[in-house]
Image (cartoon, grey):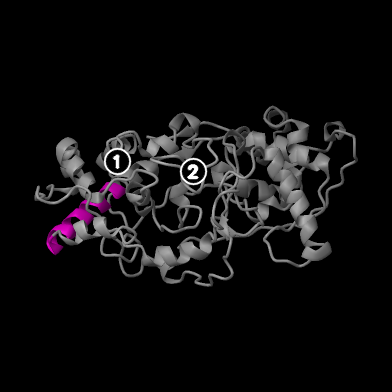
Amino acid sequence: MFKKILISTGLLIYLFPGISYAAHPDVHTWTSEEKEFLQSLWLGSLPPLPDDPSNAYDTKPGAVSFGKKLFSDERLSANGKVSCATCHIPEKTFTDNLPLAHGIEDTTRRSMPLAGMAYSPWQFWDGRADSLWSQALGPIENPLEHGISRTKCAIIIHQFYREEYETVFGPVPELDEKYSDKARPATDNQEIHALWNAIDTKDRQAISIFFANIGKAIAAFVRTIMPSAAPFDSYVQAILNNDLDEAVKHLNPDQAFGLKLFIGKAKCINCHNGPLFTNNDFHNVGVPDRKGLKRDVGRAAGITQVMANEFNCLSSHSDAGPGDCAELQYIDTDTTKYLGAFKTPSLRNVVDRPPYMHAGQFKTITEVLHFYQQEAKKRTSGKNKGFATDIIHGELTDEDLLYLESFLGSLSAPVQSQ
């Protein structure tokens, strides 16, 4: 069971307006408490990759190589032009830099970064999937993304990946050619759903097992997508080794002061904590709705969806044992509390993946920081005083924001995968 840890500190930082903190000789000096915070954020503190008990194949080399092929295969889409890599581009740290992900059509949210997602108990902005393999299946049958049926996926595996499939999962089940390749469960489309119901129960089950295994193979590859050490990590390692000469090679004074703000009065660390700079939880920070889209209730809907997901940890397609699904079994079902809440994204490589927020509402990091600065002010004064959002921090000046932005740039590094 994943533990969610919130870290806060009462550290006071003083910044003199108009003067770069680079002029202060103690910018690279850290207290014992601050060093503990730095170590908690250091990539070297990341534990080994966790196994997914619901996916018995996630560490098998054959599954990883098979999943990597599927990840980039555009045949797994209705128009033959969309793959997982369409929105999660390896050369762009597995994101696409679009405000809204675009597959067959535009979706209603932006693509989430994939690096380190194996450490998260919840997937998607709303957490409507509780594993990487369950997450991988959602876009495939989504009409706006891949727009292809699980039946068609099974046919493609038969035609092009029989050997790879059988190496990992065993014999490929035979499929009756009389069934429509458009058949899938589709409560929003009666015609398609009727095609699915026309398939024999035994064959429907076989197709769904086939489909689940496709997700498990893709997940085995996605599990290997990880961040690498950034300048920030080299800096922290040097600080922990009491090697100041080495430390100053990796963070300049302005970045170091931005880091002090990050763990101090800005309290960014309250949500962006741990080596991946995320608590993997859901928060309503008052982000405005995107013009032209319906109100997005976020986690409030995701709770219901993940509990009903036919591919969740407790499903018949899961390889988990009775005691392996604690996150789902003890899920917080208070949808009112999570109305408008979205998952905290990792901040690693954050400056390289604009635009920002769940629907690309802000074009730049500068806009995001100013939003947080002003939104917190609105919640502590005027007509919005006391209105519940999850933004809590001290008073931040415009100059503070510059230091914070400078620090965030030190979190960039190549994303690696097998």
Crowding around mark 1 (Cα neighbors within 10 Å: few <14, some 14 to 19, many 20+) is many
Asked if the magenta segment contains residue 319, the reply would be no
Tell whether position 201 is magenta: yes
Depth order, front residue of 322/338: 338
Instruction: Name above or below for residue 191 compared with residue 252.
Output: below
Q: Is residue 48 visible to us here? A: no
Q: Main secondary structure of the magenta part?
A: helix
Q: Position of residue 298 (x, y in %)?
A: 53, 59
Circle number at residue 115: none
Relative placement, left or right, of 25 versus 171 is right
Of the numbered discs in the image, which one, if any, rests on residue 111? 2
Assign a secondary structure to mark 1: loop
Magenta residues?
200-216
Query: From the viewer's perspective, is 216 left or right of 3?
Result: left
Relative to 27, say whether 154 is above or below. Answer: below
Residue 243 shows in this picture = yes
Give the x, y percent position of residue 149. 26, 49
Residue 348 left/right relative to 238 = left
In depth, the one of 47 and 60 nearer the eye is 60
- 47 to 221, vertically: above or below: below
SS state under label 2? loop
Q: Quadrant of the N terminus?
A: bottom left
**At label 1, which amino acid type do we have?**
Ala
Where does the image place residue 203, in percent across and percent down from the top left? 13, 58
Residue receiving disc 1: 78
Q: In which quadrant will I find the C terminus? A: top left
At horizontal 55% and vertical 40% (from top left) the residue drawn is 99
Give the amino acid type for the residue marked by disc 2 in the picture.
Ser
Q: Residues within 10 Å of mark 2 (few under 14, many from 20)?
A: many
Query: Residue sitting at 72 percent across and 42 percent down?
Result: 259
Q: CA distance from mark 2 to mark 1?
A: 20 Å
Badges 2 and 1: C-beta atoms under 8 Å apart? no
